[in-house]
Image (cartoon, rainbow, N blue to C red):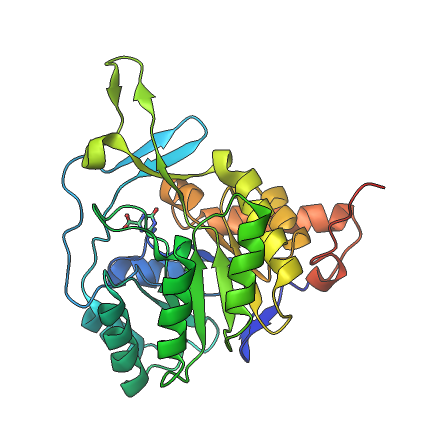
Amino acid sequence: MTNLTASIAGFHFQDLLLNAAGVHCETTEELEALRKATGTGALITKSATPKPRPGNSGLRYQDLPLGSINSMGLPNQGLSYYLDYANHYHDQQKPLFLSIAGLTQADNLAMLADIQASEFTGLVELNLSCPNVPGKPQTGYDFEATRQILTKAFTFFTKPLGVKLPPYFDLAHFDQIAAILNAFPLAYVNSINSVGNGLMIDSKTDTVMIAPKGGFGGLGGAMVKATALANVHGLRQRLNPTIKVIGTGGVQSGRDVYDLILAGADLVAVGTSLHQEGPAVFQRLRSELIAEMDRKNYTEVDQFRNRLQTLN
Ligand SMILES: O=C1NC(=O)NC(C(=O)O)N1
């Protein structure tokens, strides 16, 4: 029997797959489908803002030959909707992650205060990386703002907290963000969010593919796998061992899950492939991962987690 377990902040996961925040998780119906899906070890809510938001207007998601592009704009039902789901959540087998993405530091701190005061007993993911709110930069690219929000948060927040990071593309940035994060008692980092502000062209119409922001949107799927692996591995190499890593980005197969684990991931989140295949994707990915492990005669994830070898 292959052991796919992992743990973060005292939470034990019997499977290491979950959804990427934002995908198939805006409503309680979608969340319940994830909770009941075979192969998920956890689930995470759509990033919440204090009040409900319709998100960006017009065509805001497109599948692409090598993944997807989106500019959803944080459509969500508002924090209290997800806190209500969370307060009635009793599935001991699959921990619940609650994602928040305030448009200002004050919004984020207010939401964290609400969660701190609530009965919520799961994990919280502070999304510092939504690239799709017009006029709003990704906090994760502002190192001082990131340090500031975490400093203020940890003056009062005592529940398990992780951060969702944008992809970085310079090893000096891995050094800088890891030095900041290592100063805080974070439960985990989740890397990567979509590769922000890509642009794709519809060759039939010579137009962009999505409506918001002149067609600029977050990239996901196969085309971001190399960036996801680099960020997971670069952060794993630099972060305190107490800060676990959720690897997100580019997962289409069990081998892609295996690779993120090899690069250092403790859990693996699935976005574009979940959007394209629905919750059945988790059973497929799980069985493909087990098949890959069997080929290597591995029965435990610990036998290869963070064991990526260099050439020399
Ligand atoms: O953090 C996010 N990442 C994305 O790629 N899209 C969503 C969004 O636009 O709501 N948010």
Instruction: Give the answer, above or below, for where 136 lies relative to 118.
Output: above
- Picture coordinates of residue 43, whole percent (x, y): 41, 63
Instruction: Give the answer, above or below, for where 205 lies relative to 145.
Output: above
Residue 288: quadrant of the picture: top right
- Picture coordinates of residue 64, whole percent (x, y): 38, 28
Instruction: Give the answer, above or below, for where 156 lies relative to 289.
Output: below
Residue plotted at (24% across, 45% down): 72
Residue plotted at (50% across, 73% down): 186
In terms of depth relative to the viewer, which is nearer, 157 or 41?
157
Residue that sits furthest to the right in the current view: 312
Residue 129: quadrant of the picture: bottom left
- Picture coordinates of residue 128, whole percent (x, y): 37, 59
Q: Quadrant of the C terminus?
A: top right
256 lies left or right of 72: right
160 lies left or right of 275: right
The image shows a total of numbered marks equal to 0
Residue plotted at (27% across, 27% down): 209
Residue plotted at (34% across, 36% down): 69
- Picture coordinates of residue 228, whole percent (x, y): 53, 46
Q: Quadrant of the N terminus?
A: bottom right
- Asked whether residue 196 is in view, the answer is yes
In terms of depth relative to the viewer, which is nearer, 210 or 239?
239
98 lies left or right of 307: left
- Asked whether residue 40 is in view, the answer is no
Residue 48: quadrant of the picture: bottom left
